[in-house]
């Protein structure tokens, strides 16, 4: 049986319609799916380690666009 992912928005998004944010769903203990709430048909799939590394780098201020 295949279960649909349970998508979660950040509590900072406000939860209302039109609030665009990144949504996250886990399909296993290490597999994560990310999508933009206003484009739910496009998903990025990753594992916990690379995502944790990206978050650490962004929080450190070393990530510059």
Image: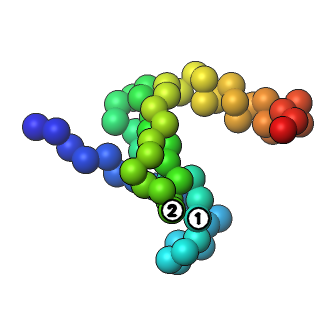
Does the CB distance between marks 1 and 2 fall below 8 Å?
yes
**First in residue order: circle 1 vs circle 2:** 1
In the rendered image, which quarter is residue 14 located in? bottom right
Q: Secondary structure at mark 2?
A: loop
Give the residue at x 58% y 71%. Answer: 19
The structure residue drawn at horizontal position 34% and vertical position 51%, both measured from the top left corner, is 6
Residue 26: percent from left, percent from top: 40, 39
User: In the displayed structure, does residue 19 sit left or right of residue 63?
Assistant: left
Say if 22 sits above or below 62 in the image. below
Q: Is residue 2 above or below residue 10?
A: above
65 is higher (above) or lower (below) than 54: below
Dot 1: element: loop
Residue at the limit of the structure toward the left, as seen here: 1
Residue 52 visible here: yes
Per the image, the residue denoted by label 1 is: 20
Residue 60 shows in this picture: no
Alpha-carbon neighbours of circle 1 within 10 Å: few (<14), some, or many (≥20)? Answer: some
Residue 9 image point, x, y percent = 51, 58
* Horizontal arrangement in the rendering, residue 16 relative to residue 29 (left or right): right
Q: Identify the residue shown where x is 59% and y is 59%.
A: 21
Instruction: Tell me where residue 50 sits by quadrant.
Output: top right
Q: How many marks?
A: 2
Residue at 42 percent of width and 29 percent of height? 31
Q: CA distance from mark 1 to mark 2?
A: 6 Å
Residue receiving disc 2: 38
Placement of the C terminus among the 4 image quadrants: top right
């Amino acid at each position: 049986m295949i279960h649909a992912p349970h998508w979660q928005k950040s509590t900072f998004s406000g939860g209302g319609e039109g609030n665009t944010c990144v949504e996250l769903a886990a399909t296993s203990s290490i597999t994560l799916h990310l999508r933009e709430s206003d484009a739910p048909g496009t998903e990025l799939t990753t594992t916990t380690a690379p995502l944790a590394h990206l978050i650490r780098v962004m929080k450190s201020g070393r990530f510059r666009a």
